[in-house]
């Protein structure tokens, strides 16, 4: 194409523009070259219609095929995003579950130490350990709340993924994986 070729400006639905951009990248062409190639292909491959009615039907069929292709690509991309989300949430759930279990074990050891201090008659040490135990149980409770939230998001993502695989649109927007708040425990 030469710079002297005629220029046209047109409006396109955003999804179509994105599909054309993606196809241009895949075919290693500019957007203009992609559009020209596709238009030329329609004129080269199309048989000369017998009437304007046949031409209209032919265009309608081609548009329907293109629309189906775009919807299919969009569906595949959405399905892939839902799968990644579900995998990420499953990983997050496993990490939270492990943290909660480690914290429970740690608190159990502190309780055993407090009982042992009480048995030895070291009431001051037992009091400090029980005080620490009360504070750390609050921390454990917040960790369990985070774990529950991640499990609920994971269940919602799994439901969305299954329903979308069977052709239904997602029940709601994908849950944005919220950043996990880091809790810092102050050492005494």
Image (cartoon, rainbow, N blue to C red):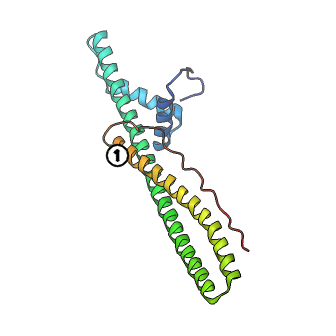
The reply, left or right, for residue 133 in relation to residue 100 is right
Judging by the rendered image, the residue that carries numbered circle 1 is: 162
Tally of numbered tags: 1
The reply, left or right, for residue 24 in relation to residue 117 is left
Where is residue 167, by image quadrant? top left
The one nearer the camera, 12 or 164, is 164
Where is residue 61, by image quadrant? top left
Residue farthest to the right?
188
Q: Position of residue 90 (x, y in %)?
A: 45, 58
The one nearer the camera, 29 or 166, is 166
The reply, left or right, for residue 17 in relation to residue 187 is left
The reply, left or right, for residue 58 in relation to residue 27 is left
Q: Position of residue 25 (x, y in %)?
A: 50, 42
Q: Position of residue 52 (x, y in %)?
A: 31, 10
Instruction: Please say if 169 is above or below 118.
Output: above
Instruction: Please say if 174 is above or below 102.
Output: above
């Amino acid at each position: 194409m030469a710079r002297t070729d005629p220029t046209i400006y047109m409006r396109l639905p955003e999804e179509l523009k994105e599909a054309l951009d993606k196809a241009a990248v895949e075919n290693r062409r500019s957007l203009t070259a992609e559009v020209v190639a596709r238009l030329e292909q329609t004129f080269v491959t199309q048989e000369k219609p017998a009437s304007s009615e046949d031409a209209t039907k032919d265009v309608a069929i081609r548009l329907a095929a293109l629309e189906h292709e775009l919807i299919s690509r969009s569906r595949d991309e959405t399905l892939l995003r839902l799968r990644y989300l579900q995998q990420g949430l499953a990983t997050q759930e496993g990490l939270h579950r492990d943290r909660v279990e480690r914290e429970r074990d740690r608190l159990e050891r502190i309780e055993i130490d407090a009982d042992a201090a009480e048995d030895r008659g070291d009431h001051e040490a037992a009091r400090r350990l029980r005080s620490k135990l009360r504070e750390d149980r609050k921390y454990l409770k917040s960790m369990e709340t985070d774990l529950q939230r991640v499990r609920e998001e994971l269940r919602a993502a799994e439901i969305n993924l299954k329903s979308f695989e069977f052709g239904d649109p997602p029940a709601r927007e994908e849950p944005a994986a919220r950043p996990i708040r880091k809790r810092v425990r102050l050492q005494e």
